[in-house]
Amino acid sequence: MKKYLRFRWILLTMAALAIIGLTGMNVYSLYALHESTISAAADRQKAQLSDFSFTTRSRFRAPVAGIWKLNMEQLHDEFDQRLPLNTSLADVLFDATEDPLFGTVYFAYPDFDNCSTQGAIQRFDPTTRKLTTAGDVPDFICDGLGLTRTRMKVLLQDYRWSTKVVFDTHRTMTVALINPRGTEIVGYLTFEINNDYLINDYLSNQLVEAFGTGDQSGMSVWLHDWLKNEVLATNTPNVPYQRRKVQYIQRFPDLLDNWNLKVVFDESPAVIASKANLTRNLLVMGGALTLLLGSLTLMLILAQKERSLLERQAGFLANVTHELKTPLAMMQAAGENLADGRVTNPDRLKTYGKHIHTESLRLRHMIEKLLDVARNDAGQHIIKPKPYSLGVLVQNYMNEHQPLIKSSGFDPVIVIPDNLPLVMVDKDSFETILGNLVEDAMKYSIDEKYLAVRLIHDSQSISLQVEDHGLGIPKKSMKYIFDKFYRAEDTLTARTKGHGLGLSIVKSLVELSGATITVESTYRKGSVFSVTFPIHVASSKKQPQMVNPKAKIEYAS
Ligand code: ADP
């Protein structure tokens, strides 16, 4: 049996480990899923940002696309001979000046060297659609031209395209016109960029259009001039820009060098949904885990209880065999002597008779207790409640057992108030309850032999109190004393004989009688057991309620 119990322990522990392992794995995969949702959402958002920067660049494309279609060789010849502006190019430039993104358009011949050289820089006049000599050229135009010329010096040798676009930050876009055959510069066109339109009209609207407000896109995007540390536009005007919170930076490809997009990823709807899902799953899993581990723990506790019950039962059997054998052996010896006729002395005859009597009483007592337990286990207690005066029952019991009690050194205090109402009890059960409590009180009083039996009464109930000033019950044993075969693990208790059955019988009889039992005990000071019986209004028509359906109840006629 022990082996089997140990095996059960191992199985239960393995089950607990398996449950914990499975839950751990599940939690891990739930988190991994959530993380991948987050990173997929972030990847989507980054792709969106990259798209945005390319779309911004393509906003500048219109004039460049127009220039591509022109014949560079022809343009080269015309510029070489300083002929008036070709109409196709004039159309392209006119369209550009109509576009709010661009301001004035300037032209420089390939050999321009210095902005201040008279006639080196031409300005496109949209009214006449002609190039005119620009007198006063703004510095940033010269910067754009200079930048492009320097860049082309490096590139030109291997360049195979007819245009090269060079942005000078957000100020100008310069298109170098190249004759790919001769690998020579045809001229430079510089478009002034209208910053006011670019920021306040175009990019501001585009940001909102592309990313919505923060809630919709799951990110706050600021167009930021890092050189001046200045926010130019944003899709979430109500969210203040905080540098340390920026999670991602998107640059523009080859243009707007001083500007970039600073981004804070908020939780996108997909991430919020995944988070809610994760929380819900974790809660359900936590609940299931608690339930499973709870039931496993319960099973372990029950297994443990069963085991200790089995151990106690085994101890009980050994004990009981011994206790049954002792009186039997004594009776056998006394009986033998008497049967032999060897004992003739009347005094000795009397002593033998007494011996046999007391031993048979002890035996009967033990057998009755065992039968009580057996009946109790089988649910076969027969309860015959009749209206009794508990005062009379207590008095009768105490009178009957007075000699034994006195001979054990006790002078019992008996308190029975006058005019107690009748209570519906089963006489035998009441006597068993009282008998066991008094027996225990005497058994567990070693030094001070004090025994009090009282009846206390209020309008609802009558309580039977049995008090002693004996060993008392250790605190940790209190909740077990009504368990079958339980005996307090205490050296003092160990010195008394018993099997841990009395109180378990008392408890079940108390329950069958519809009463309740409580105990107050202080270790080494004494104990008070109280059994409270409800007062039923005794009426021949009204039957008392059945308390335990297992018990058969017979009513007084
Ligand atoms: P037994 O007396 O045969 O051991 P019981 O069921 O009557 O069995 O009591 C169970 C345990 O409760 C006892 O072993 C003892 O430890 C404790 N107990 C019961 N009554 C008293 C008491 N009056 N004083 C101290 N301990 C008690």
Image (cartoon, helix red, strand yellow):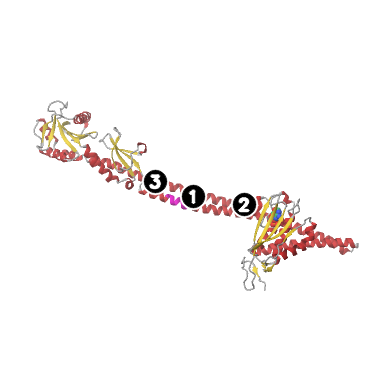
Q: Is residue 364 left or right of residue 291?
A: right
Q: Amino acid at mark 1?
A: Thr
Q: Earlier in the sequence, mark 2 or mark 1?
A: 2
Q: Is residue 30 above or below residue 418?
A: above
Q: Which mark is residue 6?
A: 2
Mark 2 lies on a secondary structure that is helix
Q: Name the front one of labels 3 and 2.
A: 3
Most extreme residue toward the front is 418
Magenta span of residues: 278-285
To which residue does mark 3 refer? Answer: 36
Q: Nearer the viewer, residue 278 or 65?
A: 278
Mark 1 lies on a secondary structure that is helix
Residue ID at (57%, 50%): 13
Q: Main secondary structure of the magenta part?
A: helix
- Cα distance between the residues tagged 2 and 1: 26 Å
Please tell me in which quadrant of the rendered image residue 462 appears. Answer: bottom right
- Cα distance between the residues tagged 3 and 1: 20 Å
- Cα distance between the residues tagged 3 and 2: 45 Å
To which residue does mark 1 refer? Answer: 23
Residue 441 makes an appearance in the image? yes
Q: Amino acid at mark 2?
A: Arg
Residue 135, percent from left and from top: 13, 29
Residue 499 makes an appearance in the image? no
Q: Earlier in the sequence, mark 3 or mark 1?
A: 1
